[in-house]
Each structure stands twice: as structure tokens, then as C-alpha cells.
Image (cartoon, grey):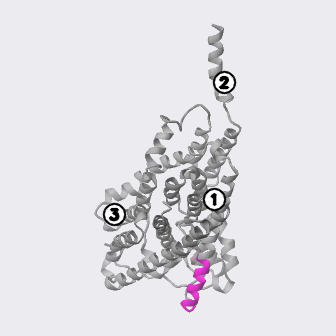
Amino acid sequence: MSEAIWGGIQGLISGFVNLHWSNPIMIGVGCLLLYLGIKKDFEPLLLVPIGFGAILVNIPLAGLMEEEGFLRIIYDAGIMTELFPLLIFVGIGAMTDFGPLLENPKIFLLGAAGQFGIFLTLALALALGFPQKDAVAIGIIGACDGPTAIYVTSKYAPHLLGAVSVAAYSYMSLVPVIQPPIMRFLTGEEERKINMGVVKKSVSKTTKLLFPLIVTVIGGLIAPRGLPLLGTIMLGNFMKECGVVGRLTKAAENEIPNIVTLLLGISIGATMDGRIFLKPQTLVVLGLGFLAICLDTACGVLFGKVMKVLTGGKVNPLIGAAGISAYPMSARVVQREGQKYNPKNYLLMHAMGANTGGQVGSVMAAAVMLSVLKGMGVI
Amino acid sequence: MDNLTFAVTMVVVGMGGTLLTLWILSLIMSILKSAFPYKKEEEGK
């Protein structure tokens, strides 16, 4: 009988006995993510489920990520099949108004420049000795676009998914802190004061309706490997603009992304098992991700300067910083910075145009990247 | 494929391809804007 009692007691303490040194650290990291989400309001919709998932997966013997574990089932169903990021994209498309971008289509180019950090960081990751597919996943943090980063990483470097996702979402929420010093460093005071005037409403409903169709067909033909990304974001936008599927649009804006965000967040958190996550490599990935977003901002502002010269001083280079996918935070940062130097300057709608261009740009950059990789025979 | 070739190809074709694609899209959008101009009557629809 004493053996049975001892066995029972062992059962109760087995969790503590099997605790790996990395588990308490990762439980602390999970708590930190919860703190950042709740107290600092850093992407709470993502960081709260990610943080909780990280805590869950670091409690030993629960088997949540083993064959029959519930987190493994969600992960396999939604991340490994790439379904979750694509469903999120339908929602993003339904929630985005591409009107400001279509008012001035040239701004599209800023959305391309804002993606250069992806490719430069990829090259740097290779120089630091990362394998080619890992370098692709690290570079994609520079898309500043969570679902795109998850889509690419889960496909080609799933072991980096936790680090890449946390980096993408954390840095996206830190855009108001990361971007202003770079914007100020690369522009002169006179440039920051440039007034771009008021955006006039000049886009017809037909143009808005044709936009998602054309992006899907042209983008898909140029970069077919990225069509799932492009197609889903444009499907969401087409539903919004056609105006005859209100119920579907409402579901795409609310219910679908709400449920998927919860499942996506908790599954990403579940990849943060201390024994896999706590490696020097993770810190390097986080550092390179930070650099990618800094490079995106710098390239966007520098391209804005080029556009300023080409347009005879009509473009304020600050709006180049909004050519990333962090919508609408980045546009707001540009508006705030512009008004610091010229209180009568309203750059918001111009920056919104660049920002939505950045959303299409990030998806297009990932699509181009995947097609180039396929063409080179790497994937 | 060695890393140098890979990196150079990705930077040149990747960055160039993204820029070119978005430039083409911006051109098409400009043409569409001219082909289907905004009409005042559309407001409120």
C-alpha cells in the first residue's frame, strides 16, 4: 500500500521533477508577452494568445504538442496547412480601403521600396551562416506582416516559426518607436515640412472593384507561387467593394479573423517550447528581424526622397516610411512626425496610400520571393 | 547553389521583381482611373 501511496505522490510531483531549466524561463517569456499585450497594448489580440500558448507548452508532461495533444491538432490543421494566415488575409482584405492608394497610384512604388529590407536581411542572414531556407524565413520578418511571415516560415523553416512570428508581431507594434528616429536621421527639416495638399476623392466605384481582380490576375501571373496570399487578400477586398455579399464581408471582417486569430496565436505560442526556442540562434533571428524593419523604413524614406526629386518637391519623403505593411500605425507615425515640423501639414491620407501600398507590396514581395526560389530550384 | 549566387539573385531579382510588378500595377491603375473617372453622382451610393 505504501508503494501505491508513493506512486500517487510521485504522480503529483512529476511535473516539477521533469521541469527542464528552460521551461521556467519560457513561462517568464510567456508572462512578458502577456504583460506587453495587456499593459502596453502591443498587438494584444496576438500577444495574449501567443503568451498563453507559450506558458501552456512549457508545462512538462501535459503533452499538448504531442501526437494527440490539442495544440498539435490545431497547429497541424491551421499552420502546417497554411490555412490560418490565408483566412486572416481574407479579413485584412475586407477591412482595407485601398481608396487612398488608388487616388495616387504612383505611391504604389513606396510600397515596393518598403520591402527592400526583406531581401537585404536575407542576404545578411546568409552571410551569418544561416541555411538558405532559414534566411528566407528571417528576411520575411521585414514584410512587417504577421500572416505573410507565418505563411512563408511554416512552409520553409517551421522550426523558426515561434521566433519569426514573435519578432514580426512585436516589431510591428513597436513601429511608433522604431521609425521616427530613422525618419529624422534621413530627412532634413525642410523636407519634413513639405505640404502635399489635400487628397481629392477621385476614384470611381468601378476602379475600386477592378483593382482586386487586376492585382490577382497580374500578380498571380507574375508570381504564381504567392497566389494564395494575393488571392485571399484580394478576395476579401473584392467582397467589400462589390457590396452584394454583406453577410460574407461582415464575417470576413469579424467572426472569421477573431476565431482564427485565437487559434493562430495559441498555436504559435505552442512552438515556443524552451528546449527548442532557447538557443543563441533565436536571439540572432530577433536581431535580424529588427534590422529588417529598420532597413524597410530607411529604404522607404530614401525612395521617398527620390520621388521628391522626380516630382519637383511635391512628395514629402516622410510618407516613404509608411510603405510597410504595419497598417495603419505607420501612416499615423508619418502624420505625427509631419505635424511636428509643420502643424498645418496633413500627410495622413497620403501616408495611408503608401501604407496600403505596403500591404500589397509585402504580399507581392513574398509572392515574388517564392516564385524566384521556385525558379532557382531552391523550393 | 552557393550562398553568394543565391543572395545576389534574391536581392536583384527579388527587389527588382517586386518594384517592377508594383510599377506595372500602378500604371494599370492610372489607366483605369482615366477609363472610369469618378463621377459626383457616385457619392452616397
Please give the range of residues in magenta: A300-312
Query: In whole angstroms, how far apart are the C-alphas of marks 2 and 1?
Result: 40 Å
| Image quadrant in which you'd find residue A94 | bottom left
* Residue A307, magenta (yes or no): yes
Q: What residue is rendered at 48% in x and 51% in y?
A: A261
What secondary structure is found at the residue carrying circle 1? loop
Report the amino acid beneath label 1. Answer: Phe
Viewer-nearest residue: A14 or A170: A14
Magenta highlight on residue A174: no
Residue topped by disc 3: A239
Mark 3 residue element: helix
Tell me the chain of label 1: A
The part of the image, by quadrant, that contains residue A134 is bottom right
Q: Are marks 3 and 1 on the same chain?
A: yes
Q: Split into 4 quadrants, where in the image is the N terminus of chain B?
A: bottom right
Mark 2 or mark 1, whichever is nearer to me: 1
Q: Nearer the viewer, mark 3 or mark 1?
A: 1
Residue tagged by mark 1?
A130
Quadrant placement of the C terminus of chain B: bottom left
Residue at (68%, 60%) from the top-left corner?
A287
- Please provide percent x and percent y for residue A4: 62, 12
N-term-proximal mark, 3 vs 1: 1
